[in-house]
Amino acid sequence: MTIDQIIQDFHQDALNFSIHLSGDFHKGSDLVQDALLKVVERQHLFDEMHPTQVKAWLFKTIKNKHIDTIRKDQRKRLLVMSQLTVEDFQDERVLKMLVTDLNEEERKVISLKYYSGYNSKEIAEMINMNPSTVRNRLSTAVSKLREAYRED
């Protein structure tokens, strides 16, 4: 298969897969571009491959690139954590105490968003709520936390 055939036949499927995998259009597009660069670098591999093998290779490459990105992000977070001071931990402890003063629904969306890293659409699906309602609850909860933190 030629590079043009690969792009023509699999680009849209690869993009859909990578967007689903990463949860973001721009991150998904970057994953596809990285994978297509590998296709160009390894063009000789695809001359003898069946189209289903090429598609499988492309999807596996996208998945591996996504995993690499996640690992890189985790290393960055660990580096930031290693640079925190005692005061930073004190502030976080205070914040966790303030979160317990929120109502159950607000605690749930705050926890899913800021501690588990889900976006409002994912949270909405988990707790059977409209994404705009989730964003509203998050905004209200964050406002309450800011106010309570100022008072503390």
Image (cartoon, rainbow, N blue to C red):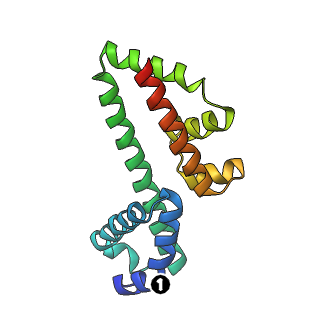
Q: Residue furthest right?
A: 128
* Location of residue 50 in the rendering, given as x and y in whole percent from the top left corner: 51, 79
What amino acid type should be assigned to the residue bearing mark 1? Answer: Asp
Q: Residue at x 48, y 71 (%)?
A: 14
Badge 1: residue crowd in 10 Å (few <14, some 14–19, many ≥20): few
Specify whether 73 is left or right of 135.
Answer: left
Q: Is residue 126 above or below residue 100?
A: below
Q: Residue at x 68, y 49 (%)?
A: 126
Q: Is residue 47 above or below residue 34?
A: below
* Location of residue 52 in the rendering, given as x and y in whole percent from the top left corner: 54, 76
Quarter of the rendering occupied by the C terminus: top left
Could you tell me how many numbered marks the image carries?
1
* Location of residue 97 in the rendering, given as x and y in whole percent from the top left corner: 54, 19
Q: Residue at x 64, y 52 (%)?
A: 124
* Location of residue 72 in the rendering, given as x and y in whole percent from the top left corner: 35, 43
Write down the quadrant of residue 2 in the picture. bottom left
Q: Secondary structure at mark 1?
A: helix
Q: Can you see residue 54?
A: yes
Q: Can you see residue 50?
A: no
Specify whether 112 is left or right of 60.
Answer: right
Q: Residue at x 40, y 55 (%)?
A: 65
- Return the residue at label 1: 9
User: 140 or 76: nearer the eye?
Assistant: 140
Specify whether 59 is left or right of 101.
Answer: left
User: 9 or 93: nearer the eye?
Assistant: 93
